[in-house]
Image: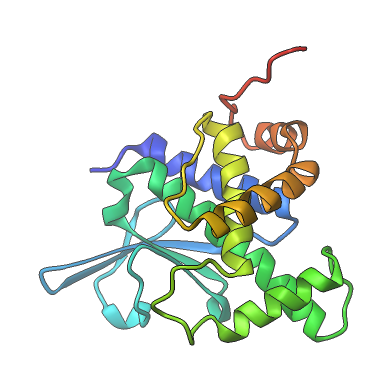
Amino acid sequence: MHNYNQIQYINKLIHMTCCLLGINVPYVYYFQNENNEFKLYDHKLNLISYEKRDMNYIVKQVKFIPKEYTIYINKNILTDEIKTYILIIMQCRAIYQLKQIIYYSRNMSIDIPEFLAKKWLYSFNVHSIYNDRTYMNDLEIDQNAFCYILIKILLNISLHFDTLEENLRSLKSRTDILYNEYNIYRVWKCAEQYGIKPKYIPKLE
């Protein structure tokens, strides 16, 4: 039995992150698929189906399905709260990235510089080609940098990335850039709208 407060926090976190990013809130479903028994739950963990055909996708942990505008969450990862929050924040950022890529491809107005949109589009197109790779592409760097900022402000936890030095330099650079946009005051303001109290309190100089 999962903690009701945890599910409430996840729902608030999704709404807060989408508010911060200026995107529509996706549908959210949880699922469990063990011992040939499938269960599908709504965003409040109410059981709604035993039919695997109601979620005809391969999802290991957390995954956004664009054509349904839905995030599916494997119930098994809820035992690791921090990991769950990290994956959810990254998926919300992925929705934002996809929106920018689509808008750029259609010559519509975007929120990011054109050079970055080009990098994101390239990373999106070649992502499936490199399955066994040790480097992070520009989409992954941005997702991790954004996640680092939110986890630090909301939970006062500094994430550590076990990756190549080249990736770490790119992450540091992207985090510095994003922090100018998603600074602590902006995140706090958005968090308070959804009843989330950030744990990081900056020291007064």
Q: Is residue 92 left or right of residue 9?
A: right
- Image quarter where the N terminus lies is top left
Percent across and percent down for residue 59 are 36, 72
Camera-nearest residue between 11 and 183: 183
The residue depicted at 82 percent of the width and 64 percent of the height is 112
Q: Is residue 102 left or right of residue 93?
A: right
Furthest residue toward top: 205
The residue depicted at 47 percent of the width and 45 percent of the height is 10
Furthest residue toward left: 35
The residue depicted at 56 percent of the width and 24 percent of the height is 199
Camera-nearest residue between 134 and 143: 134
- Image quarter where the C terminus lies is top right
The residue depicted at 55 percent of the width and 58 percent of the height is 167
Q: Is residue 156 left or right of residue 114?
A: left
Is 148 located above or below residue 69 in the figure?
A: above
Camera-nearest residue between 11 and 140: 140
Q: Is residue 70 left or right of residue 100?
A: left
Is 4 located above or below residue 103 in the figure?
A: above
Camera-nearest residue between 152 and 22: 152
Is 62 located above or below residue 153 in the figure?
A: below
Which colour assignment does the render follow? rainbow
Percent across and percent down for residue 163 are 45, 56
